[in-house]
Structure formats: structure tokens, C-alpha cells
Image: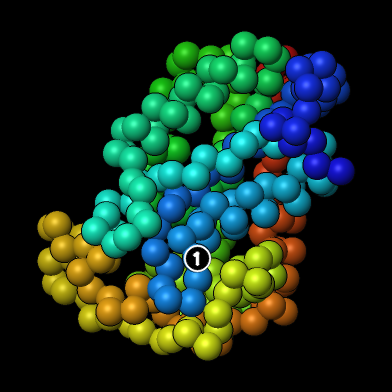
Amino acid sequence: MVKAAINMTRDEVKTAIEEYPVAILPIGATEQHGHHLPLGVDIYLAEGISKRICEKTGALLLPTLPFGYSWVWRDIPGTVSLQQHHVEAVIKDVAHSVSRYGVKTLIIVNGHDANNASMKYATRELVDELDMNVVYLFYPDFGAVIDQYCESKPWHGMIHACEFETSLMLALKPELVDMSKAVREYPEKPALYGKSTISLGDLSKSGVYGDATLASKEKGEKLLEIFVEKMVGLVELATQNHKNKE
């Protein structure tokens, strides 16, 4: 059973934290993912994985942060983008909030690549501000996992609306996936990409980076199983390390 804070009373949350002082914060983004996937892909994936981790560990599930740093898609209808330092500030505020009533380890489960910098720098600042473990996770070892379980290669190591994300969505939210609109696109990478303001939004016609047509529910379920197992192991390690410090 998932202990979702948003559905619990104050007394239930207090008891849950006394029993296991670990909370999980899923963070995603609201942005385009091609014509075959909804804007909330990163939200659904972060939350879906977090729920499974909570089921296996007993951690408290915090509400999902639905917005991230989505500057590259800012002109596409539906996108909501926070500034990078605002994402960092929200993470820090959540950490300070939950630490006040006994959470000893905060696990951030991210579904959106561009949030990684915010997670890293927020965590570095928090180590000097709180007596609490903060661990940030984003598909551990995803490069090796993709090589083994996906048929297509990611676009320059990046995952977006591709076989990988589409497969995960087919496993978690199949009713929101329209495979008749899935495409394969590997845009040319300009020499100044990553060194200038040239962004993903300038490169792809479909919004897909990779081959979404190869996605399947079976692949998605296998990927979920692998990543949940890896993340559960990291949660247990983080919790043990905290206990050792005490």
C-alpha cells in the first residue's frame, strides 16, 4: 500500500514518519512529448516509479511537482516552465518543510532530464543547512539499460518521447498513448548545439528524439522493474548510511 501524504491526515503522516522517516518527492515537467504522448509524461513517469518504490519500502509519497525547467519548449502550447533556480528553490523549500516534522531522508525521483542540475545544486546547499539525507535519482545506469533492452539508440544520449519513454508510458498510462502518431526522428545536431542558445525546440519537427515506433508495453514493464529495483536499493543504502551516522 502506498502512503500518499496528500490522502492522509496529519495523524497518519506523523505515524508513518515515526515508523519510517523517509519521504519521496517525484518531480516532473509539463512540456511537449511529440504528437503521440501527453504533456505530462515526465510527471506520470516520476510518480509511477515513486509509487512502486514506496510500495516496496514504506516511504511516504509526497505530491508530485508538475513543473520543471522546460525552456526549450517554451513556445509550444501547454508548456509551463520554471526558471532553473526556482526549481532548485522549491526542492530546498520542500526539504526544509519535511525536515521540521521528522523526515530523516528525502529521496527525489526525477522524470525530466533538465531538472538534474537543480537537484544537484539544491542537494549541495542542503547538506550545509539540514541534518537530513537528500538523494536525487534519475534512471540509474539508464545508458546501459537502454543498450540492453531497447532496440533503438537514444539521440546523443538523451531520452525524449523516444522508444524508452514511450514504452514506460505504455506500461503506466497506455490510455494516454496514441501509437498511430508515433514517429522516428533523429534531428541533425548542429556544431554549436550545447554551446549556444540553439535548443531542442529548434531541431525536431515532431518533438521526438529517437524511435518511438519501436516502443511496447512489454519493454516498459521490464524497464520499470529494473529501475524500481535499482532505486529501491539506493533508497535502502541511503537510509542505512543515515542510520550509521546516528
Vertical comparison of 243 with 160: above or below: above
Nearer to us in this view, 132 or 69: 69
Check disc 1 and report its element: helix, strand or loop.
Answer: loop
Coloration of the structure image: rainbow
Q: Let me know if residue 72 appears in the view.
A: no
Percent position (x, y) of residue 184? Answer: 41, 87
Vertical comparison of 74 with 235: above or below: below
The residue where tag 1 is placed is 38
* Label 1 environment density (alpha carbons within 10 Å; few <14, some 14–19, many ≥20): many
- Residue drawn at x 29%, y 62% as measured from the top left: 76
- Residue drawn at x 70%, y 14% as measured from the top left: 102
Dividing the picture into quarters, in which one does residue 140 lie? bottom right
Nearer to us in this view, 170 or 223: 170
Residue farthest top in this picture: 100
Residue farthest front in this picture: 77
Nearer to us in this view, 3 or 211: 3
Percent position (x, y) of residue 181? Answer: 47, 85
User: Label 1 is placed on what type of residue?
Assistant: Pro
- Residue drawn at x 66%, y 72% as measured from the top left: 174
Along the horizontal axis of the image, is 59 left or right of 39?
right
Percent position (x, y) of residue 235? Answer: 70, 40
The N terminus - image quarter: top right
- Residue drawn at x 67%, y 53% as measured from the top left: 49
Numbered circles on residues, count: 1
Percent position (x, y) of residue 173? Answer: 65, 66
The C terminus - image quarter: top right
Q: Let me know if residue 170 appears in the view.
A: yes
